Amino acid sequence: MGTRSRLTEALILKWMKAQFRETGQWPTQRSGPVSGEPGENWSTIDCCLRLGRRGLAGGSSLARLLNQTGLKPNRREPAALTIEEILAWLEADHRATGKWPTREGGARAPNGLSWASIDFYLWHGLRGLPGGFTLARLVRFHRNVLLRAHWILPVKDGQRLITTAAELTALLVTRGPLQRPDLLWSLRERQRKFQEAAARQGRRRRR
């Protein structure tokens, strides 16, 4: 099977509008084949929007795309979550208990949510999250950033200055360092300088 072509939200919206003109209904993940686009299926496109496949950013859906563009408002859709918001809750829980929360529980259920539900949203890319991450993996990733924050931060991401571990974790989780070569270069340069300084300090101690 050949590589599937990349998708964009603009292209998906074009297909959605064409299907609406033809059927009088906005497509959902149960709408079957995309009208006029052989090999494309609305269920697959919804999955790509949620999980960030075929060039899409992730954390969306057919329903969310319609809602965000005003084509089909959905007042019942829950508010979006962000990785930085979840990290703030994780850190608050850790400060309160001395332990990092798991999907089985923690000290607090932020905004009425359970850690199990947050784990579910993270993995499936719901409520604006990128998808493909578990709560346990997010905690491990953030702890690794925290351990290295003293030599990583601050770091430039284009014109933006990243100053906190939570900001850096969120950026790496949602975009990935390999997708931002300027950020990746900056991280490597910081690591090189840190290692050189550590080596110089080691040589001074041996004298």
Image (cartoon, rainbow, N blue to C red):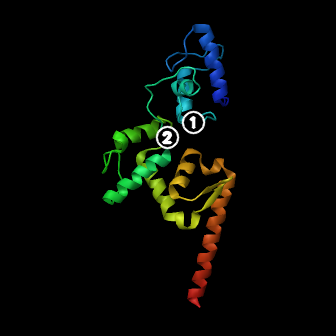
Name the residue at 57% across, 49% down. 171
Does 75 sit left or right of 203 as displayed? left
- Report the residue that reaches farthest toward the bottom: 207
Frontmost residue, 64 versus 1: 64
Image coordinates of residue 191 in percent, x first then y, are 61, 66
Frontmost residue, 155 versus 206: 155
- Report the residue that reaches farthest toward the top: 23
Q: Quadrant of the N terminus?
A: top right
Name the residue at 43% across, 44% down. 134
Does 120 sit left or right of 69 as displayed? left
User: Label 2: few (<14), some or many (≥20) within 10 Å?
Assistant: some
Query: Which amino acid type is marked by label 1?
Result: Gly
Disc sitting over residue 52 in the figure = 1
Picture layout, residue 6 above or below residue 28: below
SS state under label 1:
loop
Displayed quadrant of residue 152: bottom right
Q: Quadrant of the C terminus?
A: bottom right
Displayed quadrant of residue 2: top right
Query: Which amino acid type is marked by label 2?
Result: Gly
Image coordinates of residue 93 in percent, x first then y, are 35, 53
Name the residue at 53% across, 63% down. 149
Question: Along the polypeptide, which appears first: circle 2 or circle 1?
Answer: 1
Disc sitting over residue 132 in the figure = 2
Determine if residue 137 is in view: no
Does 94 sit left or right of 176 as displayed? left
